[in-house]
Amino acid sequence: MSQTDQPTAEKDASVEFAANLAEATQLTQAIWSKLAEAPAPKETGDTDPLNTLPVMAELARALWSDPSKLAEATVNYWTAQQAIWQSAMSKFMGNAPGPMPEIPEGGKRFSHKQWSENALYECLKNSYLLTAGFIQDQVMAAPDMDKRDKRKAAFLVRNAVEAMNPANFFALNPEVLEATQAENGANLVRGLKMMLEDVTRGKGKLLIRQTDMDAFQVGRNMAVTPGKVIWQNKIAQLIQYAPSTDQVGARPFLFVPPWINKYYVVDLNPKKSMMRWLVEQGHSVFIISWVNPDARQADETWDSYLKTVMEIIDVVRAETGEDKVNLGSYCIGGTLAGTLLAYMGKMGDERVGSATFFTAQLDFEDAGELQVFVDEKTLTMVDQQMDEGYLPADTMASAFNSLRANDLIWGYIVNNYMLGKDPFPFDLLYWNSDSTAMPAHVHHFYLDQFYIHNALAKGTLRVLDTDISMADITVPVYHVATREDHIAPANSVYRGAQMMTGAKVRFVLSGSGHIAGVVNPPAAEKYQYWTAQKLEAPDVETWRAKAKETAGSWWPDWNKWLHAQDRRKVEARVPGAVNGVIEDAPGSYVRVRFDQR
């Protein structure tokens, strides 16, 4: 570019930036208008709905119970901050950086080169990471705190420090500033347009998109395993998958998925689908598709969900002509299945021949990070949110996202709304965004009886007018936990398996987490799993130390176990041959999105 052309180019850039800034201002006003359309929160008069003040007061008491230790940690912290500043100043002056204290890892949020090459940004990053680490370390080191209170305090503090990450702020993020300069603000226009669409989709609430929402569609490229809906009531549809082998196992397999999110996590696409893989292994496969409830399901209860599963078991038995089914379950679907099997065991009901549990908690003594949301006071707050007979879908989605706020909230706020980039198409995140509501009575029972009172593990749970306990489960059990699970911790799942004293249990520990450790097809050749004959170890890590480790997916091991429950073979079954066909899979219930109502 010649010197003559340079002023013209600069002028054109200034005009473009001014135009983009004006459009960004208009978009911001439109966003505020949409936000104002959201229903006003219900007035409860409660200034602390999550019951945080008692926990934080307990944390302060615990920290001050040993003031010398706190003082020593504080002095070390400020000494480290001074070293960070001195090193940054040395680097800024063109000299070699000085000695640095140990700094926690920053992760991908600080991957831009300026966070490590620019003295100012590096100082800002290191100071933040040191502070975040110091605060969280003090919480974990606080003496004489109740375990649940400490976990809740750690969650609250972690979310606070993640919100203060300098990468979250426009003026402090070098990548955002660089993009804004390079694009003359066009990135902000794209981002604010995206934000307006997300607020509009959320009817006044910001529903952060985590993937390309147009890249996927249930029934088109997700949940596409062939089958038919052969039965339904007002809370569930039953899908029977079409066989792909000439012969199938005589005893059918019925899967009870969670109703927090939708069933197709086990039928994401042909390569990842557990349901398709089961069909290919010669099983007669049925799966429940729960309704996405609204006020019409206001009267449903835990008992009515149990009755529905038992009715479906009879439908499957009639369709196949078999006396028993193999029952599978996942997450909260496993909690429901556990109570069902305990009830059936107590009643001498033998319609289930075996049970499989994936990351299913039955003992809630140490029930993972979701436990921070549940106590007697917060349950009252949740009840107030369910005054129309159901918990809105976005409420639970927000809770799950807050468990991994850095990745599922703040990273997308920067990527989508500041950088103006479309999120990467990812089937699992599309499924994650396809949130479901929950019937009020069902959700209250779940939180109260399991998270607060741990009634099944204590033998005090009452369902269908019957007292039940874990010892009432008597069928053979295949029980899967995942080592990095933050929703159903492996040790909690392990303890639940130990409590099934009336059943023969094969316990399997899988690598990875709540989803990836379960949705792990053998062809992917990922992760590993551990098996052992006995469950005598006091905790899962002690058990793992003596267990056999096998590379890859646990699915083939499970398939071998499933076939061993009943080795008879029959001719492949045509879906709906007995009960008739209502519609093609995946059915209509799974297609109902809360953000399209």
Image: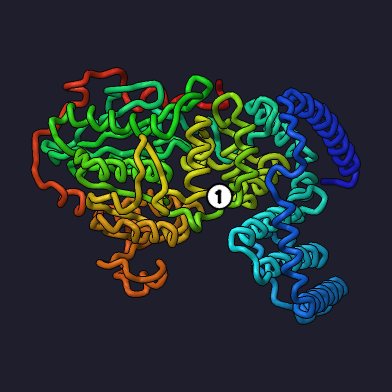
The correct choice, above or below, for 578 with respect to 148 in the image is above
> Callout 1 environment at 10 Å: few (<14), some (14 to 19), or many (20+)?
some
Where's residue 6, x and y in %?
87, 44
The correct choice, above or below, for 162 with respect to 594 in the image is below
Amino acid type at image mark 1: Leu
Q: What secondary structure is marked by label 1?
A: helix
Where's residue 176, x and y in %?
75, 48
> Residue 195 lies in what quarter of the image?
top right
Residue drawn at x 75%, y 73% is 65
Residue 532 seen by the camera: yes
Residue in front for this viewpoint, 369 or 15: 369
Q: Is residue 532 left or right of residue 72?
A: left
Where's residue 582, x and y in %?
29, 18
Q: What colour scheme has been applied to the protein in the rendered image?
A: rainbow
Q: Is residue 531 left or right of residue 5?
A: left
Residue drawn at x 35%, y 26% is 237
The correct choice, above or below, for 60 with respect to 384 in the image is below
Q: Quadrant of the C terminus?
A: top right
Where's residue 147, x and y in %?
59, 63
Residue 117 seen by the camera: no
Residue in front for this viewpoint, 318 or 27: 318
Residue in front for this viewpoint, 127 or 424: 127
The correct choice, above or below, for 138 with respect to 393 in the image is below
Residue drawn at x 55%, y 23% is 596
- What residue would you read off at disc 1? 370
Total number of numbered labels? Answer: 1
Residue in front for this viewpoint, 22 or 285: 285
Residue drawn at x 51%, y 41% is 429
